[in-house]
Image (spheres, rainbow, N blue to C red):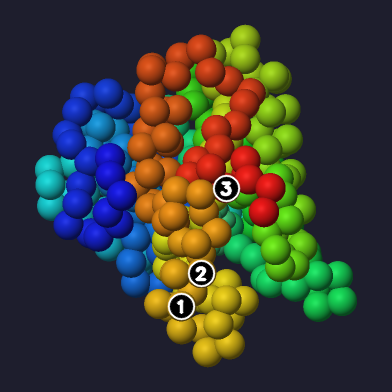
Amino acid sequence: MNADNTSTVRPERTERLKGRVALILGAGTSAPGISIGKASSIAMACAGASVAALDFNVDTAQDVTQEILAFGGQAIAYQADVADIVAMQAAIERVMQDFGRIDILQINAGIGRVGGPAETSLEDWDRIQKVNVESILIAAKLVAPVMVKQGSGSIIGVSSVAGMRYLGYPHLAYSVTKAAVIHFIKMLAQQYAGDGIRANTIVPGLIDTPRIQKNVAKVFDANADMDKTRRARDQQVPMGRMGTPWEIASVATFLASDDASYITGTEIVVDGGLTGKFV
Ligand SMILES: NC(=O)c1ccc[n+]([C@@H]2O[C@H](COP(=O)([O-])OP(=O)(O)OC[C@H]3O[C@@H](n4cnc5c(N)ncnc54)[C@H](O)[C@@H]3O)[C@@H](O)[C@H]2O)c1
């Protein structure tokens, strides 16, 4: 895996996840480009997994499945809001009809709104909580029993360094929910360790994905100038650059694989050194 986030760069093909089915929630993108869910879907397909790519915005999930099918992988797109248990139940039933099992569950959809308590409406707080945290309850409620029956599974939560540290600007609802992701996944890991299910969280640092255009660009430049935003984010990181979605996808693929067979109930911070620095 590398530091290039262009769509022409792909992970090498392996058989690390051969025969496994990966359900990726939030597999699409919120704007053109490569998101963490898209990169994870493609990376797992490159490792031999069949991918169930689920997104609220199904067109973007279909872009992902088309890319996977184009290189000879297996993938189907599904539409659902991760915070809607009825829609999720229907989608997961279809995944089971199509693939017959779920070995990997990556709970990746996430939203936020910049602001502190004064700027955060109760409606926003509620929606962010639902999409970022209640979605884990819903997904685990529906998928853990499938994995228990199989006797194996890997659940991957996607938090953020915002769930561990103050980022330098208020992003309250997002940060609180991202802290909850870490603890929720730890609780799942403990409960299901004896069932052959591992559960871990990836904690990405500042990653160069389409989301930053929509969400955080205005924090760095009043006109949301993306070049200025990218430079400002690059400079915050000890390694001197944001991470790429591929650098998160490679960790997701590792956690999904047998290479991580003794890893459960923990989090892996992937941040170029960001959380280790004082100023
Ligand atoms: N980009 C970063 O710097 C960064 C850093 C840390 C953590 N993260 C986390 O990584 C995850 C992916 O982020 P990204 O930057 O790739 O973002 P993104 O916005 O490009 O991708 C998120 C995807 O989730 C989908 N989604 C959103 N709400 C949904 C819902 N209710 N139901 C179904 N799908 C829904 C969106 O349509 C989109 O395709 C998020 O959880 C985010 O919080 C991102």
141 left or right of 55 in image = right
Q: Residue at x 55, y 82 (%)?
A: 221
Q: Would you say the residues marked 2 and 3 are in contact, meaning their CB atoms lie under 8 Å apart?
A: no
Location of residue 88 in the rendering, given as x and y in whole percent from the top left corner: 55, 50
Label 2 secondary element: helix
Question: At 45% across and 48% down in the image, what residue appears?
Answer: 239
In which image quadrant can residue 6 be found? Answer: bottom left
Looking at the picture, tell me which residue is in the foreground, 78 or 163.
163
Residue found 70% across the figure and 20% down from its top: 191
The one of 36 and 69 positioned closer to us in this rendering: 36
Left or right for 218, reference 55: right
Q: Residue 274 bears which disc, if any?
A: 3
Q: In which image quadrant can residue 194 be found?
A: top right
Q: Mark 1: which secondary structure?
A: helix
Q: Earlier in the sequence, mark 1 or mark 3?
A: 1
Q: Count neighbours of disc 2 (C-alpha within 10 A) and say few if under 14, some if 14 to 19, many if 20 or more.
A: some
The answer to whether residue 76 shows anywhere in this view is: no
User: Viewed as shown, does residue 248 lie left or right of 157?
Assistant: left
Q: Mark 3 falls on what kind of element?
A: helix
* Residue 191 vertical placement versus 126 (above, below): above
Name the N-terminal-most of marks 2 and 3: 2
Q: Which residue is mark 1?
A: 228
Instruction: Residue 176: give its label.
Output: none
Q: Amino acid at mark 3?
A: Leu
According to the picture, the residue beneath numbered tag 2 turns out to be 232
Q: CA distance from mark 2 to mark 3?
A: 13 Å
Q: Are marks 1 and 3 in contact (CB under 8 Å)?
A: no
Image coords of residue 255 (percent x, y): 45, 28
Residue 104, percent from left and from top: 44, 32
